[in-house]
Image: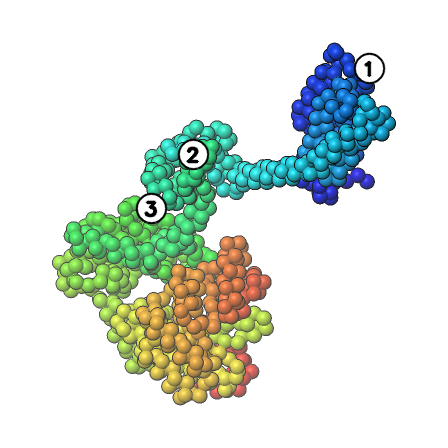
């Protein structure tokens, strides 16, 4: 089977470096040969006419052989034959012109240059050797056959000279031609490569003159604006910028002013469809022999990156569920407004509201119904304020409204509107959701300045005034009233917390945690409750006050001691491998009192430190990260484990992972509650599990309330599950009765 021409040329080294003869190259050789033939057919005639005719016939044969060779797609034996046939043609023309006796030729011997030059340009060294032999034969055959006086023996000198030309000078010319061909080919390949790199670059590339006009643009550049590359040539690049912007002109001006530098900028293009495309420009001035100095601009479409960053920025400042501002954004805006008030005078108000009976919705109808209600109420709040005001979800069912302008009357009207709208909306719902109302505490910034107190604390206390007064109403802190909030609910809570510590009125409930791989309840989370008369108060009602008034370390110390006492009992009576997760406030992490309480209680109750898992909420504020890290290191050396709760709910997650010691990562329930139906939540869960696994940490999924959720957790590689499907928080006796019924029945209760 015949190989392709490219393979044939590559296989033969000489052919790989030499050009093949073309009609354009052969034309000047043919002209010279024809002129020589014409000169010998003109009188006077030194030789018979048939010699000239035979020369003409031989020249025709040369032409025919050359044309036959051209019809082939690859080199063959025909290519040098045409050149070889020029030797007898040169001999005939030389003879027809009349080679004189005694070695005085007609001068037509110079025609021997034609085949030698041709082979030097298109042939191989071996073919030049053949040409040398043919040059000798051109002179030797007439000498040997005809002899003197027409062809004297002295013509051998011409044979030697022409053979030397073919053997010595022609190879030199051949090497020169070969080197020129190589250089030309390299230059052409390099130029083609540059052209391809320019045209096929995955990002936009444009060449501009120093005025910013487009000289050339590649396909990717044209695609960005929805045109063909030729349609962009001649226009200024700034013509494709979003109207009203002038960044490109400034960019080019700065570049021209400092030609040795590279400048970067970001701007927006307006495409042919009227859509804006975010791009990043990187430009420099380069020299071109043909065009002089030109500006080369690299253009990268960063629309996806911009949308991603905008989304991250939005997530950093907004609540994932409701889309409202989160606590971080709220605190930033509150600080900004307080600064404004200090400069121009107090104005505006802060409204803090909490949903009444909302917990019953979650407990009775499930978290999905609770989430839907929160989303609806968020919409009601958003429609109740001006665009210049701010509504935020601070956590759970607690919201805040920052009115940036207005007096006490305006705050009263907005608060009343909020209470009415929430009550009226809940009235349209079924079941326990009908009983959901709002308690609102409203404080103007003028009133807060009169009390010289933290407005958020005042609003919180005022909100609890509304709850104490019967809920579903507003409590307003009057301006000019030195008494402060009527019941000073938060201050009252401080005394209630202190009394609970003194009189042991706190209770610990246990929520089971299941090892997904084994299905075994291997641990539980300790949850704090406050027994206040007939009410069992959840920590959301009093932990905030305890943190504010500095009582949280004492509360945490009580929890640690009672938890370890309970753990010692569980391991002795029920499960010797059982573990407990104990929550610590972010403000308690690193506190010497807590460290002393842990070490003392471990010794006091004889509990293996590895059975104690200290849990910190990721959204909690750690007072001193460096001190907390040292604390975590000491506790880890002691044998205790750490868990990071609500992972993903805030943006300190990765910072804490890097700077603190954690053994468990508890995935925030926001990403678990709907994971069976939300691909986004499932992707986030998979990412958290992957990060935890790579860091050598184990994962716990919270809010596991349905079998489908548990199955997704199992498929994604979560280690432990916690939620109402596994078990609700219950007292110790109920917990033991449910999970160790036979043992619990045999052990008398206290």
Upstream in sequence: badge 2 or badge 3:
2
Q: Position of residue 221 (x, y in %)?
A: 48, 37
Q: Quadrant of the C terminus?
A: bottom left
Question: Percent x, y for residue 26?
Answer: 69, 26
* Circle 1 residue: 48
Density class for disc 2 (Cα within 10 Å; few <14, some 14-19, many ≥20) is few
Mark 3 or 1: the one toward you: 1
- Residue 273: in sight, yes or no? no
| Residue 559, percent from left and from top | 37, 78
Q: Which residue is mark 2?
A: 292
Which residue is at 70% across, 26% downward? 110
CA–CA distance between discs 1 and 2? 65 Å
Q: Which quadrant of the view contains residue 555?
A: bottom left
Q: Which mark is residue 23?
A: none
**Quick one: SS at disc 2?**
strand
Q: Quadrant of residue 175?
A: top right
Q: State the residue at coordinates (46%, 43%).
A: 300
Viewer-nearest residue: 171 or 5: 171
Q: Is residue 613 above or below residue 357?
A: below
Q: Is residue 280 left or right of residue 246?
A: right
Q: Is residue 366 above or below residue 46?
A: below
Can see residue 484?
Answer: yes
Please state the horizontal and vertical placement of residue 733, each as a whole percent of the image: 46, 80
């Amino acid at each position: 089977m015949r190989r392709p021409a490219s393979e044939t040329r590559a296989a033969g080294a000489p052919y790989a470096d030499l050009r093949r003869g073309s009609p354009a190259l052969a034309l000047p050789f043919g002209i010279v040969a024809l002129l020589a033939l014409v000169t010998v057919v003109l009188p006077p005639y030194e030789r018979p006419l048939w010699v000239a005719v035979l020369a003409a016939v031989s020249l025709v044969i040369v032409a025919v052989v050359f044309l036959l060779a051209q019809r082939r797609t690859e080199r063959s034996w025909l290519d040098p034959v045409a050149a070889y046939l020029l030797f007898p043609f040169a001999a005939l023309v030389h003879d027809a012109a009349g080679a004189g006796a005694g070695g005085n030729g007609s001068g037509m011997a110079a025609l021997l240059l034609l085949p030698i030059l041709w082979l030097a340009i298109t042939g191989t060294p071996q073919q030049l050797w053949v040409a040398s032999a043919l040059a000798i034969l051109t002179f030797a055959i007439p000498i040997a056959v005809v002899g003197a006086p027409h062809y004297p023996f002295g013509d051998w000198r011409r044979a030697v000279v022409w053979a030397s030309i073919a053997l010595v000078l022609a190879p030199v010319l051949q090497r020169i031609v070969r080197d020129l061909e190589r250089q030309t080919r390299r230059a052409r390949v390099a130029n083609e490569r540059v052209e391809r790199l320019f045209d096929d670059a995955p990002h936009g590339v444009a060449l501009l003159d120093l005025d910013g006009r487009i000289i050339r643009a590649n396909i990717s550049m044209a695609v960005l604006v929805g045109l063909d590359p030729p349609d962009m040539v001649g226009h200024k690049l700034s013509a494709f910028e979003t109207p009203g912007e002038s960044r490109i002109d400034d960019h080019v001006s700065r570049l021209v002013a400092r030609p040795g530098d590279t400048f970067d900028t970001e701007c927006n293009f307006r495409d042919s469809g009227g859509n804006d495309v975010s791009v990043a420009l990187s430009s420099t001035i380069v020299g071109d022999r043909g065009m002089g100095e030109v500006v080369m601009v690299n253009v990268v479409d960063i629309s996806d990156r911009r949308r991603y960053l905008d989304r991250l920025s939005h997530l950093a400042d907004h609540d994932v569920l409701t889309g409202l501002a989160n606590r971080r954004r709220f605190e930033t805006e509150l600080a900004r407004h307080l600064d404004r008030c200090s400069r121009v005078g107090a104005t505006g108000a802060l409204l803090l509201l909490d949903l009444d009976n909302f917990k019953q919705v979650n407990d009775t109808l499930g978290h999905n119904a609770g989430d839907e209600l929160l989303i609806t109420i968020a919409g009601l709040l958003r429609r109740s304020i001006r665009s210049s005001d701010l509504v935020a979800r601070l956590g759970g069912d607690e919201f805040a409204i920052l009115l940036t302008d207005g007096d006490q009357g305006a705050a009263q009207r907005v608060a009343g509107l909020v209470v009415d709208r929430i009550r009226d909306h809940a009235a349209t719902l079924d079941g326990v959701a009908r009983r959901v109302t709002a308690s609102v505490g409203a404080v103007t910034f003028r009133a807060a300045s009169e009390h010289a107190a933290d407005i958020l604390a005042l609003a919180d206390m005022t909100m609890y005034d509304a709850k104490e007064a019967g809920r579903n109403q507003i409590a307003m802190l009057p301006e000019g009233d030195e008494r402060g909030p009527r019941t000073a609910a938060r201050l009252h809570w401080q005394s209630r917390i202190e009394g609970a510590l003194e009189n042991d009125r706190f209770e610990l409930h246990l929520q089971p945690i299941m090892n997904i791989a084994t299905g075994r309840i291997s641990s539980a989370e300790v949850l704090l409750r406050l027994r206040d008369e007939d009410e069992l108060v959840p920590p959301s009602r009093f932990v905030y006050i305890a943190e504010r008034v500095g009582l949280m370390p004492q509360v945490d110390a009580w929890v640690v001691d009672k938890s370890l006492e309970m753990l010692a009992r569980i391991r002795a009576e029920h499960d010797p491998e059982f573990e407990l997760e104990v929550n610590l406030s972010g403000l308690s992490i690193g506190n010497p009192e807590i460290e002393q309480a842990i070490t003392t209680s471990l010794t006091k109750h004889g509990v293996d430190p590895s059975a104690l898992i200290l849990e910190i909420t990721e959204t909690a504020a750690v007072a001193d990260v460096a001190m907390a890290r040292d604390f975590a290191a000491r506790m880890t050396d002691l044998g205790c484990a750490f868990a990071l709760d609500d992972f993903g709910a805030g943006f300190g997650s990765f910072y804490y992972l890097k700077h603190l010691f954690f053994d468990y990562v508890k995935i925030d329930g926001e990403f678990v509650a709907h994971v069976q139906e939300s691909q986004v939540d499932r992707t986030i869960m998979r990412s958290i599990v992957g990060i935890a696994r790579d860091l050598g940490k184990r994962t716990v999924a919270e809010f596991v309330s349905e079998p489908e959720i548990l199955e997704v957790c199992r498929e994604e590689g979560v280690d432990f599950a916690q939620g109402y499907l596994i078990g609700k928080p219950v007292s110790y006796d109920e917990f033991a009765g449910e999970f160790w019924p036979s043992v619990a029945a045999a052990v008398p209760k206290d």
